Structures are given as C-alpha cells and as structure tokens.
C-alpha cells in the first residue's frame, strides 16, 4: 500500500532512468561527506597495498544511494562488480554458486543482505574471512565436506535493517557506512545535476522547494522532478515554483514532504492513540500497512523530522507531530506552549 510517488523503493520502470542518473565516481556522489571521506581512505589504502578493499556494509533507509555507492566502489577500484541480493540467496548452494564464479578482486554486491538464508550466512562467514568455503556433498553417514578456495573479493552488503544482521556477520565487515537522510542543500545539488542530465530547465527556487519536500531521499527527489517536469510541460506559462507546489499538491505530498502513508502513521498515533505510546504491530494493523515498511521507511523519516519519537513503550507523537496532525487539542504536553 506504499505511496507510489514517495515509496523510496525503486519501481521497475525507474531502474533504467536511475541508471542514467547514477553518479559513477565518489567525486560525483553528492552529500554524505562523512561516508565519502571514509570510503576514500579505505579504497586508497587498498590501492596503495595492492590488495582487495575490506568488506563494506552500507546501512540506511532505501533510496539513499547504497547501490550507487557499491557501483562506485567497483568503478573506483577498477574491478568488475557482480550484483546479487539476500532474497535470491535462499540456500547455501545459491551462495556457493555466486562465490565460486567470482574472478580475483571482484566486488560482490549483496542488496538486502539481512534477508539471506541462515544456512548461507554461515558459509559467508568463512568466505569473508578466509576466501574459502566448505561444500557439503551427500547426506547422512556418506556426507563429506569438500573445501573450495575462492578468489579474493570484496563483499559490499547493503541493508535497510542493520539491527537484523546477526552479530557474527556484522563483525566480519571491515567497515560499516551509515547513510543518513540528505540535507535540503545536498538534495538541491542532486536535483540540479539530474535536471542537467535530463535536459530540464528549472529555476533554483523551484529546485530548492522540491529538495525541501523530497523526504531527504535522492530517489524521491529524482522521481518528483520527473512529475514536476511533466506538470510544467502540460501547464506551459506557469512559474517553476508554482509548478512545484501544484504538482506536489496533485501528488499528495504535503508542505513538510510527508506522503499519504507518513500522514496515516502520524495521524493514527496522534488521533487514534492520542499521541501514543503505541506498539509497532498495533500501529501497523490500525493503518493496514506492513510493520516492516513502517519500521524501515516511515519511522526513520518521521523521527528525523522530529514528528514522532521511539520510547521503550512504543511510538509517540512529539508536540510538533501532534500539531502537524492537527491534534493539539489532544496533547496535554502542549498546554501553555
Ligand atoms: N549521493 C547521490 N548523488 C546523486 N544521486 C544520488 C545519490 N544517491 C542516490 N542518488 C540517486 O538516487 C537513486 C537511488 O539510489 P540507489 O539505488 O543507490 O539507492 P539505494 O539506497 O540502493 O536504494 P535501495 O535500498 O532501494 O536499493 C540513484 O539512481 C541515483 O540516481
């Protein structure tokens, strides 16, 4: 039920379009200065020692640039990159097939690594540590384990739920990059770059407004840019800034960049549960949305915007959240504010 316009996951139609907008070097990658600086040193050190870079875990909500960074790591090291994903690795055998096909120095990107099968995880520990795996053949008394040497490789794992990764797997990554939501200034630079690549002429002020309402997420910024471009095409003559405002209203993105599902979550906490606290599964049932989506997509954004908070007893709306939901009258903490 996620909102198709502000769902941070990519749609199939978007993948080709995203490919064209993807930065291909660290220098081109906008924002995330800390992660960029950390990766620069890590890759440079590996280059100086002529070895494969350490395994890297990229953690953060969808649409912030994890796949982009993995591609950049491949490009910056001049190594081929192979793409896989947790859901595609449902048996140890699936992983053995991927690992045994790697060429020396290859970068293996595993998206949604937290969704990989448990049996494969154990195989991955050995592979990450010693570049070898043990393949089990046969069953019962006749079963035997055959060791297989692997080519040295760099694993780049991406996860929206680093808390769901078992500690032994997390510990085997030499470096974890935590991607944060983007500041509006950085999103404006992402948008200016995309507008140039898409040949869209649009005023700075309009880009700034769009950046402010893009949920801190480059994927959403690029998606909204396409919708605004269409709107301006159809409504020739209106100003770019008016175009942004009208298009976002049409697509149900509010002044603060909240989409329909963000508002449903906030509204439920504020009105139905009178500001909370409310548990995740109760909240999910109340709005008919998956708990996983709320936890990995909606909550991080609402928390960062200061609209909701997480407490040991559940989610609560902050005074700002109560105000945004129009529920000030229900909030005792707002008395006298
Ligand atoms: N720092 C950035 N600078 C410019 N564009 C970016 C940046 N980060 C992401 N993008 C754009 O946003 C799109 C989405 O990024 P990407 O696919 O890397 O996100 P992701 O975190 O891997 O998402 P998911 O978890 O859904 O796979 C990319 O096509 C790219 O064009």
Image (cartoon, grey):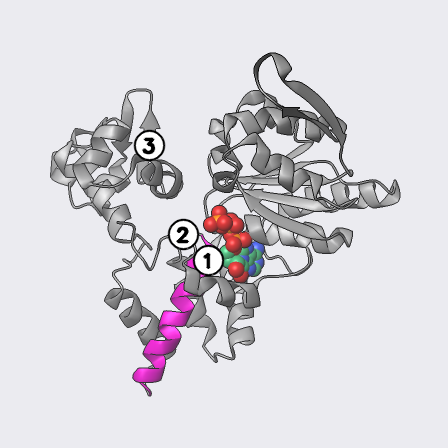
Residue under label 3 = 309
Position of 126 compared to 222: left or right?
right
Which residue carries the number 1 mark? 219
Q: Where is residue 89 in the image (x, y as percent from the top left)?
A: 53, 38
- Evaluate if marks 2 and 1 touch, with contact meaning CB atoms under 8 Å apart: yes
Of mark 2 and mark 3, the one earlier in the sequence is 2
Q: Mark 3: give few (<14), some (14-19) or many (20+) Cα within 10 Å.
A: some
Coordinates of residue 51 in the picture (x, y in percent) = 83, 40
Mark 2 residue's CB less than 8 Å from ligand 1: yes
Q: Name the residue under label 2.
A: 8
Which sits in the foreground, 124 or 67?
124
Q: Does the magenta stretch include residue 331?
A: no
Distance Cα–Cα, label 2 vs label 3: 21 Å
Between 187 and 108, the residue placed more toward the observer is: 108
Question: Residue placed farthest to the right in the image?
Answer: 49
Side (left or right) of 224 relative to 255? right
Question: Of the residues tagged 3 and 1, which is closer to the observer?
Answer: 1
Question: Magenta residues?
Answer: 217-236
Residue 64: in sight, yes or no?
no
Residues under labels 3 and 1: Cα distance?
A: 25 Å
Looking at the image, is mark 2 or mark 1 earlier in the sequence?
A: 2
Give the vertical position of 327 relative to 73 (above or below).
above
Q: What element does badge 3 sit on? A: strand
**Residue 297 in picture, x, y percent from top left:** 38, 43
Label 1 crowd bin: few (<14), some (14–19), many (20+), radius 10 Å: many
Judge: label 1 CB < 8 Å from ligand 1: yes
Question: Residue 34 location in percent, x, y?
Answer: 63, 43
Q: Which residue is drawn at 28% across and 25% down?
A: 314
- Dominant secondary structure (helix, strand or loop) of the stretch shown in magenta: helix
Residue that sits furthest to the bottom in the current view: 237
The image quadrant of residue 105 is top right
């Amino acid at each position: 039920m996620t909102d198709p316009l502000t769902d941070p996951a990519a749609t199939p139609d978007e993948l080709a379009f995203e490919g064209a907008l993807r930065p291909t070097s660290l220098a081109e990658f906008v924002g995330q200065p800390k992660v960029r600086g950390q990766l620069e040193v890590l890759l440079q050190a590996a280059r100086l020692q002529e070895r494969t870079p350490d395994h890297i875990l990229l953690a953060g909500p969808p649409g912030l640039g994890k796949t982009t960074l993995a591609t950049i790591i491949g490009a910056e090291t001049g190594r081929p990159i192979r793409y896989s994903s947790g859901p595609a690795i449902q048996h140890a055998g699936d992983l053995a097939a991927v690992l045994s096909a790697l060429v020396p120095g290859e970068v293996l990107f595993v998206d949604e690594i937290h969704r990989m099968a448990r049996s494969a995880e154990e195989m991955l520990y050995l592979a990450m540590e010693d570049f070898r795996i043990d393949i089990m053949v046969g069953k019962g008394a006749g079963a035997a384990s055959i060791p297989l040497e692997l080519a040295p490789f760099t694993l780049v794992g991406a996860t929206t739920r680093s808390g769901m990764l078992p500690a032994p797997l997390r510990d085997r990554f030499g470096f974890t990059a935590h991607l944060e939501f983007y500041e509006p200034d950085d999103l404006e630079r992402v948008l200016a770059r995309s507008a140039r690549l898409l040949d869209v002429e649009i005023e700075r002020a309009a880009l700034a407004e769009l950046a402010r309402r893009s949920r801190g997420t480059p994927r959403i910024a690029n998606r909204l840019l396409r919708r605004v471009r269409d709107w301006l095409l159809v409504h020739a003559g209106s100003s770019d800034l008016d175009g942004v405002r009208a298009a976002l209203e049409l697509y149900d993105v509010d002044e603060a960049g909240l989409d329909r599902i963000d508002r449903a979550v906030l509204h439920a906490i504020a009105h139905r549960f009178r500001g909370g606290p409310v548990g995740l599964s109760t909240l999910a049932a109340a709005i008919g949305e998956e708990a996983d989506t709320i936890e990995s997509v909606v909550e991080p954004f609402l928390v960062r915007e200061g609209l909701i908070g997480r407490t040991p007893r559940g989610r609560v709306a902050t005074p700002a959240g109560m105000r945004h939901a129009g529920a000030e009258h229900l909030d005792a903490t707002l008395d006298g504010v």
